[in-house]
Image: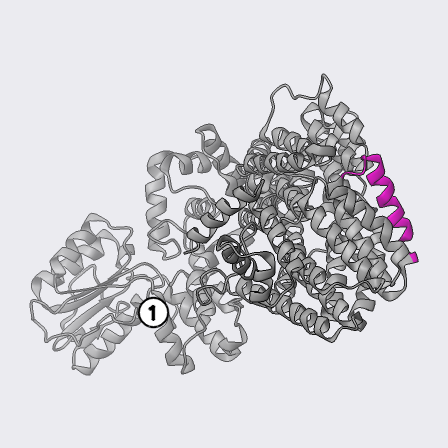
Amino acid sequence: MITDLPASRSQAPERGARTRRPPASGSPHGHVVVEGPGGTGKSLVLDRMADDFRSAGTTVLDVAVLDLAGDPAPEAAPGPSAVVVDDAQWLSTAALDRLRRLVDEGSSQVALGLRPWPRPDALTGLVHALGGERLVLGHLDRGTVQRWAQERFGGALPPALLEAVVTATGGLPALVEPLLRSLAHARPDAFPDGRLPVPDDVLDVVRASLGTLDAGTRAMMLALSAGAPLETDVLAAALAVPPHVIGELLAEARSSGLVLGSGAVVPLAARVLRETSPPELVHDVLRRSLDVLVRRGDQPVGLARRLAADRVRDTAAARLLERQADIALRSDPATARGLLDAAVACGSPGAVVGARRAQAAALSGEFDAALRWADAVLCDDEALDRPRAAGVAATVLAHRGLPSHSARLYRLAGSERTGAVALSLVSTGSANEARAVMAGPGHAAEVPSLLAGCEELMARGVLQSLGAGEHAGGDISAALSTLSRAAAMLEPLGRSALLQETPSALAALVAMHCGELGVAESVLDRAVAADTGGAPNRARHLLLLAWAAMLRGRLDRAREHLLRAQDPEHALEPRDELYLQALDVGLARRSGDAPGLAAAWARAREALLRYPVDLFSLLPLGELMIAGARLGESDRIAPNVADAQALLERLGSPELWATPLHWSGAQAAILLDDPAALRPHAAALEAAARTSPYAANLARAGRCWLQVLTGEIVAGVVESTAHDLAAVGLAWDGSRLAGQAAARTVDPRARTTLLSCARALAEAHDLGARTAATGPGSGRPGSTPPPAGRLSDREREVAELVVAGQTYREIGSRLFISAKTVEHHVSRIRQRLGASNRSDLLARLRLEIAQSG
């Protein structure tokens, strides 16, 4: 009797496969061979062929009554007959020989179904003798599965769900058919994200197919599904069998349809294997596979992760995961953190990997977890890698407004972090101590790293920015140069550098404190594009970009940066939260949003409580000084202002860092209409004006505001000063100065002039904002505002007339401005072009005009 392994009647052939009506008996081409792995629909094809034979009047000999051991009785098959045999690979040699004789005699047609394996010699000969039509079935592609779904649903599956069906089943028809049937009842549009519910009847088909396989074949499939490579030596070692056996096991597995030609196990089969196999068998196969691969130099991370997922302690897996985590720390901290967690699950002691876990968490922006692991290492005197843990904790505390604690921890991190120690000290006003640290005998690491070099350059750059006296301007340039070199040194490290502050942020702060807003935006744009410093510093760079845009008056652009800086999944650290809230205050004040200003002020004061003043938080403090005066609540932040002033005094009152704070104090006094409060700030700006062009502009603005408040308004001076402010990026402040002077003057002609100036600056500021929003080259020719260091349109008009030889009075008459205003324009042009005398100025003007065409 011919025996057949049971097949599901729901199986279907691959679409596109042809089944034709068998030709008349005796035809030399009347035989059909249907070949394919299990589950591809051979049984259904053979059933249809048997029906076709009967419809044509051909007697189909049932295998139950056909005695293949002897001659068939004549009465058993009157007239034309056919034999339909499924799973011929399991027939005995005697049965195959009898079928061969029937074929040779031509007395019956034969429809033969078989799998690719096993293939005994007698079966090979029979297939060759049959000739005729050969129908090969296989796994379905996505297009065919989609057509099947359309036949059942009347519409296409969503792409994600289609991909889930094809991936889970491997395209095996015996699994696709019942799965689609279950989706037809459950409405496929209920799974827009592609999450696939698998009913029990589909899993039962898989279990039945796996149950027909040899135990060794199932073990091999288990190893493949766990990540073992399709290599004979590896699988033989993992299964503890001779290498030649692997070929037979693989052939059986592919023949079942549950392993694809590539060697990948159908995911549903892999799932059932894992659920039904004894855990000790699974772990044994995984460990042996991993051991073979590690010994030959491979890095089977997937196998190690599988062991970790089951919390199997394995030394080789733990060491492998640690090594891969060390590599990932340089480029992908989140992956490194997962690998280290897996290493602990495989048996790595927490004290051994704790510092690295802390570093990976901190680089991923998970500061709470970083502090927990770092603290556990620091509290364990026998723990390894304590310097790394100290560096992580120091960085987190610096972000959270505890620079003094940060400096102490950086000292524990070793001589390599000397630059970080100095930077923490100078941020709190301990410049002399910072210089001593940098000059100390143990300041250099034995093997200096890029990180150590970068931090040393950052500390030196900030110390250079504190310079005062006649060389202060040169010190600012040197500071920017030093910080730029630090940023270039950091670029190869990218996101893997864990820093309390990035050189790009420090360079931007220095640039904004001296009015070089274009420089600030340039270095920050580059930092954002390179993701310098990774997750802990992304918000920092965007918030500083927003600040630069706000100073320029580009409020919409500032709001865009502000939104990008806020991650809904992670709260900002106290340092960044202070900048964010101060930006909200500044934007509300500049927009005239009184309710918004009051709400933002309350949030900002709370943020200020959680982040004490340091050298790098003077900008938000200055903005809050102005808002406090506007709201009549200056006393609320008076202690913070006093702390800032004391910090600056300890640093020697550096003009670069003190100038913006004095300008904010001056504006606060202006809002309070308090000339007495304005005078000390104006005097400080006057003192700084000797060495800083930016401070000189602000000093002139302070004097002008004082004159406006006392009623001594000279329209030409106000107009010139307003343009000076616009020239250093403070167009909004210049427009406000002109507008306030216009409101206070009693001269109608002066009022008209000043209002015109205020409107012109506001329009220029709006045009700049629109140009910045659309990007370079998006507007009409000439729509881009002049870059820093070049001349504005009005200055160019004055320059052309100066080159033409006209006097200040003649130029003023020509341009409808006063001779005094012309003089101020020429003075500003000389400063911007760096001319030392009149002849030098004329030469530079001629070159400037020639270059502009």
271 relative position to 408: left or right: left
Residue at 39 percent of width and 68 percent of height: 8
| Percent coordinates x, y for residue 100 in the rendering | 14, 58
Q: Is residue 451 or residue 190 the one in the foreground?
A: 451
| Percent coordinates x, y for residue 23 in the rendering | 12, 75
Relative to 154, say whether 391 is above or below: above
Q: Quadrant of residue 266?
A: bottom left
Q: Quadrant of residue 678?
A: bottom right
Residue at 58 percent of width and 30 percent of height: 450
Relative to 422, say whether 122 is above or below: below
- Magenta residues, as a range? 635-654
Residue designated by label 1: 143
In magenta stretch: residue 687: no
In magenta stretch: residue 641: yes
Quadrant containing the C terminus is bottom left
The answer to whether one can see residue 585 in this image is yes
